[in-house]
């Protein structure tokens, strides 16, 4: 006990020093901390509230909607999906006119997957991996089921539940592959695909590539253009701090924008939508992948979050989350590994996104004890994984020390016992 | 000139009396009127801001997101699509568990149209009408194009550009009809379909029926259950005052909920979504038609608007908009008809929704002059239609008198001339 207390103190000392040197430390002042004692490690699920967002949303409600009414559409709402998309493009290594905010991630994934499958007639396989977010797999299955020619989804298995072996993935990409669709960072383990290498392999086989960057955007550098990626989707409520259910985005490489067809040809996807013309004529650019009227209040909040990520810069954000991750792994090695906690993320920092996952046989009960008794919020993913997400703009090194200290207490004092046997998490 | 001034004064006198007797008059106090001189007749496109909405959205941003962070999902966000749906059900003649808030109108139309087409194998026709909102037609075409068997959309033409002849519609419904999909109220003319009669005819032919109630919900009584309707979609930003781009809703008759399949099987559509299970298993109820994470900030605003509509009651709302419509038609007969303005809505009140449309050869220029010089906001729909939407909770009879007086001035003083020849409206 004495040893680990000493170890904790040493970590605390180091953490304070690292926090003082953190070039992004000033960004904490941009966010609301309603409960100073709360240790929040779930910014990879719902990012914190930026202070400016409340004022911007209030202005949008009162001055724009209340004051301008329908004229708000001409004042800027109509262009908002593309305007915020152009900002997002700077985080994605995309050009102006290649990214738009629209719908939710699953709807965007559906639109782009169907459009890609129809652009590769004769090929009938979608390649993905078993670490992909479950609903990405559902949506890909749904898209395949709509196509006439008996399409199927091949999910490359993971050998260790943590990573996908590149050779396994490459071996599954064949001349029958129409589309390779993967999550850039795996939601459970944090495993990070090599976007450039995978895209090159898929292109060599004649397939299109669609990346879900929900778990990387804002925390991991992404270069869609340099990687050659064809398509991408992602959400804005994780590391981009866009708010609960903030709208998602989509990327379509400029060269494909006049080739692919949106299967849900809504009003905002039409050439000259306000002509209310008979007969559908797709927009001649990225707008053809929009659908309907964008949710302005949610979009305003998302824009504020994107602005903050741009102000911080993705380079410093990645540097910081890499350092936080390595620090957390050292804390685990020193304080948690001997207590039955396993590392369920890649050990090598460069192969991880911005969250680190741990396994424990009583993972759900431990997670509940952390939340219910320790004022620590990680999150739990079945069957036994506890995720610690590190937000580049708000997480401190000292937060990790205190979070692991409380984690250790839950184990040492067996505080998880009263939560054991509660069955799977429902919400 | 003297005669019409006298006529205007008589209308003013009558309007003040009608406004005093209006049982919904007190609801104006619930709304923001930032510019008291503005005459706003576009609540059928974007309803006004309820005063309570600003406070509710701020609470959602600050207390829920800022204070509760990810716990907000357990506190109520997860259930919001169904909770607000159950409220909407009371405006739609639907039961609890039959309506959910989700996505946008076009995405919902797509999901339900595709699911209906797949439930009627062997039938290859979608019947709609030429007065349907253009993007509903686009989306139905898009849905048909995805099905393997050469589906096609038949849009029954209108004989007068105002109404659909019931016999024309019925004649087009055959044993090949999989789906009849119509807008309950036509966006341009305000023509109101007989939901019960059309649904019965479609069912007699073995087809499913999908109504878009965007232009009727909150203003026109709807009884989905009594009419036998199978499916419906609609938006919340028109007569429901839910805010710019507020989320849409969908209705699936309970008996069909375990039969139809959502073609976009997102996370929120799964049985036990938080199990993050491998393999898709659809929810066993209406939730299977949800897709992904709902946009909470926009949804909170929508709920406030729905609450107000429920407090007012759909019976009084319809009575008032019928009276407003008849009053407006009388104003037109007295003051506008002789000045080259035609009525482009059904003359019979019972066959109209809550807006009345007028035609003028210089419709676009007249609309622009009204907005730019007269502080009157109707809206323009190509080729030559000016719509006056009457919101049951905010439009007064005196507003109609003053609106028509300003309309008359634009014509008498030919103020539209400086806006003529500007070409079609782009935004």
Image: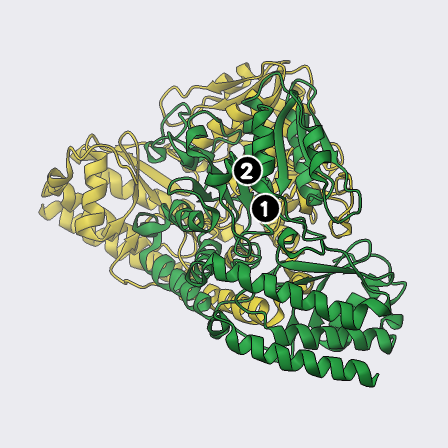
Chain colours: A yellow, B green
Residue placed at 73% from the left, 59% from the top? B357
Q: Quadrant of the N terminus of chain B?
A: bottom right
Residue B18, compared with residue A182, is above or below; it is below
Residue at 55 percent across and 33 percent down: it is B112
State the count of labels: 2
Q: Where A37 falls versus A314 (above or below)?
A: below
Q: Please rate how many residues cluster around mark 2, counting C-alpha atoms within 10 Å: few if below 14, some from 14 to 19, many from 20.
A: many
What is the chain letter for disc 1?
A: A
x and y, in percent, of residue A110 in the image = 57, 32
Q: Nearer the viewer, residue B20 or B41?
A: B20
Q: Gap in Å between the C-alphas at discs 2 and 1?
A: 9 Å
Percent position (x, y) of residue A310?
A: 55, 56
Residue B71 placement, left or right of B29:
left
Image quadrant in which you'd find residue B198? top right
Residue A107 bears which disc, if any?
2
Q: Position of residue A386 (x, y in %)?
A: 28, 38
The reply to whether the C-beta atoms of the residues labelled 2 and 1 are less than 8 Å apart is yes
Residue B287 vertical position relative to residue B382 in the rendered view, above or below: above
Judged from the image, the secondary structure of the residue bearing numbered disc 2 is helix
Identify which residue, B49 or A298, lies in the foreground.
B49
Q: Is residue B125 toward the left or the right of residue A349 in the image? A: right
Q: Earlier in the sequence, mark 2 or mark 1?
A: 1
Crowding at mark 1 (Cα within 10 Å: few <14, some 14-19, many 20+)? many
The residue identified by callout 1 is: A102
For the C terminus of chain B, give its image quadrant. Answer: bottom right
Q: Residue at x 63, y 78 (%)?
A: B14
Label 1 secondary element: loop
In percent of width and height, residue B55 lies at 42, 68
């Amino acid at each position: 006990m004495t040893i680990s207390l000493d170890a904790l103190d040493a970590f605390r000392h180091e953490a304070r020093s690292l926090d003082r040197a953190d070039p992004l430390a000033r960004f904490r002042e941009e966010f609301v901390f309603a409960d100073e004692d709360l240790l929040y490690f779930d910014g990879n699920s719902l990012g914190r509230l930026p202070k400016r967002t409340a004022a911007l949303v209030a202005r949008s409600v009162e001055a724009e909607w209340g004051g301008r009414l329908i004229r708000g559409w001409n004042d800027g709402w109509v262009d908002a999906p593309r305007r915020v998309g152009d900002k997002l493009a700077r985080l994605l290594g995309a050009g102006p006119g290649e990214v738009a905010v629209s719908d939710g991630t699953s709807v965007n994934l559906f639109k782009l997957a169907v459009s890609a499958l129809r652009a590769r007639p004769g090929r009938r396989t979608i390649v993905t991996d078993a670490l992909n977010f479950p609903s990405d797999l559902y949506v890909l299955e749904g898209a395949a089921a709509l196509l006439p020619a008996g399409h199927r989804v091949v999910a490359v298995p993971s050998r260790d539940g943590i990573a996908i072996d590149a050779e396994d993935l490459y071996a599954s990409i064949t001349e029958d592959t129409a589309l390779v669709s993967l999550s850039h960072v795996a939601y459970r383990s944090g495993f990070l695909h090599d976007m450039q290498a995978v895209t090159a392999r898929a292109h060599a086989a004649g397939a299109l590539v669609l990346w879900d960057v929900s778990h990387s955007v804002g925390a991991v550098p992404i270069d869609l253009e340099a990687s050659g990626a064809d398509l991408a989707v992602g959400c804005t409520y994780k590391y981009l701090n866009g708010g609960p259910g903030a709208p998602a985005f989509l990327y379509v490489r400029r060269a494909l924008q006049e080739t692919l067809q949106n299967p849900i040809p809504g009003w905002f996807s039409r050439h000259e939508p306000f002509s209310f013309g008979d007969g559908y004529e797709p927009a001649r650019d990225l707008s053809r992948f929009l659908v309907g009227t964008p949710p302005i209040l949610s979009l305003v909040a998302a824009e504020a979050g994107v602005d903050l990520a741009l102000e911080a810069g993705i380079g410093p954000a990645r540097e910081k989350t890499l350092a936080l991750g390595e620090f957390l792994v050292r804390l685990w090695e020193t304080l948690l590994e001997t207590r039955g906690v396993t590392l369920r993320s890649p050990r090598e920092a460069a192969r991880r996104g911005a969250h680190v996952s741990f396994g424990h046989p009583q993972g759900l009960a431990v997670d509940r004890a952390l939340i219910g008794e320790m004022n620590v919020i990680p999150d739990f993913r079945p069957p036994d994984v506890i995720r610690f997400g590190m937000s580049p703009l708000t997480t401190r090194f000292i937060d990790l020390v205190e979070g692991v200290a409380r984690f250790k207490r839950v184990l040492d004092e067996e505080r998880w016992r009263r939560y054991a046997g509660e069955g799977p998490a429902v919400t």
